[in-house]
Image: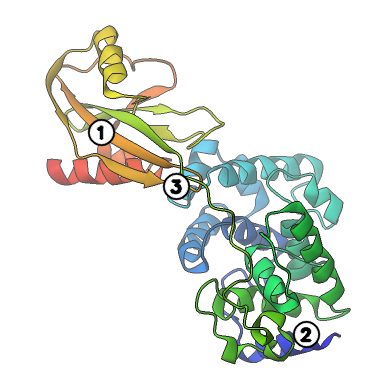
């Protein structure tokens, strides 16, 4: 083993994380955790993971569930394509692999939502196979340790990091080493204010020894964050609200939302054409929901109907009691709005 690997695995035994609910579990649970941990911190993931596994304890149970059921348990975690891909992958595993999570790296890569690093992590953690990983935390660790400059999302820089990840990979104790890399990036070699004095790899770290810890990894080139606007039409009758299912692709794909429009004029025009009668209407306080690549300015327009239409406004729409809607697959800003509506009605 390289000195780097030796130091990390020794450190992990004493200082690493050993009580995460997916550690030491089968490939299914490791897979769930790896997908949930993409773009999301451990502390946030744990309660979602526990509820998800309780609802879908096996690949077969996940495959048998409806997309709505899966997304309802995913609601609040964000990046909803991850939940949809989990569901699709479970159905493929049931059909092609008889419900057993595949052990072969190349077969994992064929599943939706699984890339090179995720497949490698499953191989290493669940099957103790010798595979290198390169998630966000590991990119930061290796960029600092090896002194690799440049934004880690750049293809040339990424390939350098992959070569370094492969070169440092030990011949044995791969699961412990992989967990050590993840733990080091999450708890010591953090993005800001890294705890270099607690790092087992400090002696060989180029960033530390050259005073470049704050420079590496090179930040992503800054771009102006695009800003978009939307009007949510909150159509209410009693405690019921109209929701519609969004298309499978795009933001909040497959989730239930109030009718959404580019601006208030478009929302009002749609409402006039719908033939529904209003008893009162009001603008609620506008707010901003921030995505990875843009900011969405949301204007909620609440309209209370004098009578509820016999049918939903269009296919893919339905009326739900607000309490029931809060249990459905809805995105975070809609959940916040409905909680506020519920509070007002209560």
Instruction: Say which residue label 1 marks.
Output: 300
Q: Is residue 87 left or right of residue 143?
A: left
Q: Where does residue 249 sit, x and y in percent of width and height?
A: 56, 31
Q: Where does residue 9 sit, x and y in percent of width and height?
A: 73, 86
Given this view, does label 2 or label 3 mark the residue nearer the observer? 2
Q: Is residue 67 above or below residue 281?
A: below
Q: Residue at x 43, y 40 (%)?
A: 329
Q: Is residue 268 above or below residue 296?
A: above
- Which residue is at the front of the view, 182 or 67? 182
Q: In what element is the residue under mark 1?
A: strand
- Which residue is at the front of the view, 306 or 166? 166
**Label 1 crowd bin: few (<14), some (14–19), many (20+), radius 10 Å:** many
**Label 2 crowd bin: few (<14), some (14–19), many (20+), radius 10 Å:** some
Marked residue nearer the N-terminal end (1 or 3) = 3
Q: Residue at x 53, y 44 (%)?
A: 80
Q: Are marks 2 and 1 in contact (CB under 8 Å)?
A: no
Instruction: Say which residue label 2 marks.
Output: 4
The reply to whether residue 44 is visible in this rendering is yes
Q: In the figure, residue 207 lies in which quadrant?
A: bottom right
Marked residue nearer the N-terminal end (2 or 1) = 2
Instruction: Say which residue label 3 marks.
Output: 75
């Amino acid at each position: 083993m390289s000195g780097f690997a030796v130091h990390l695995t020794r450190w992990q035994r004493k200082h690493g994380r050993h009580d995460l609910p997916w550690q030491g579990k089968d490939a299914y649970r490791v897979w769930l955790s790896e997908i949930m941990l993409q773009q999301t911190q451990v502390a946030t993931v744990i309660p979602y993971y526990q509820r998800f596994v309780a609802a879908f304890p096996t690949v077969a149970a996940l495959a048998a569930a409806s997309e709505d059921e899966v997304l309802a348990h995913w609601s609040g975690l964000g990046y909803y394509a991850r939940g949809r891909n989990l569901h699709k992958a479970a159905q493929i595993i049931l059909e092609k692999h008889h419900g057993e999570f595949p052990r072969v790296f190349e077969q994992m890569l064929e599943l939706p939502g699984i890339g090179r690093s995720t497949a490698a992590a499953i191989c290493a953690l669940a099957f103790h196979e010798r595979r290198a990983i390169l998630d966000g935390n590991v990119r930061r660790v290796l960029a600092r340790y090896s002194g690799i400059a440049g934004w880690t999302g750049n293809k040339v820089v990424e390939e350098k990091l992959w070569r370094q990840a492969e070169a440092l990979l030990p011949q044995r104790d791969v699961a412990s080493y992989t967990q050590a890399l993840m733990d080091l990036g999450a708890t010591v070699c953090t993005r800001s204010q890294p705890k270099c004095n607690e790092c087992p790899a400090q002696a060989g770290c180029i960033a530390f020894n050259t005073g470049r810890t704050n420079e590496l990894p090179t930040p992503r080139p800054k771009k102006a964050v695009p800003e978009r606007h939307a009007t949510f039409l909150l159509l209410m009758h009693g405690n019921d609200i109209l929701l519609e299912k969004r298309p499978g692709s795009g933001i909040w794909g497959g989730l239930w939302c109030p009718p959404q429009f580019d601006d208030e004029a478009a929302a009002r025009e749609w409402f006039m054409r719908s033939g529904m009668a209003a008893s009162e209407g009001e603008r609620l306080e506008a707010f901003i929901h921030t995505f990875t690549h843009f900011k969405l300015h949301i204007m909620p327009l609440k309209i209370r109907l004098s009578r509820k239409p016999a049918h939903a406004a269009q296919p893919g729409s339905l009326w739900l009691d607000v309490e029931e809607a809060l249990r459905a697959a809805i995105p975070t800003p809609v959940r916040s709005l409905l909680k506020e509506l519920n509070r007002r009605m209560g």
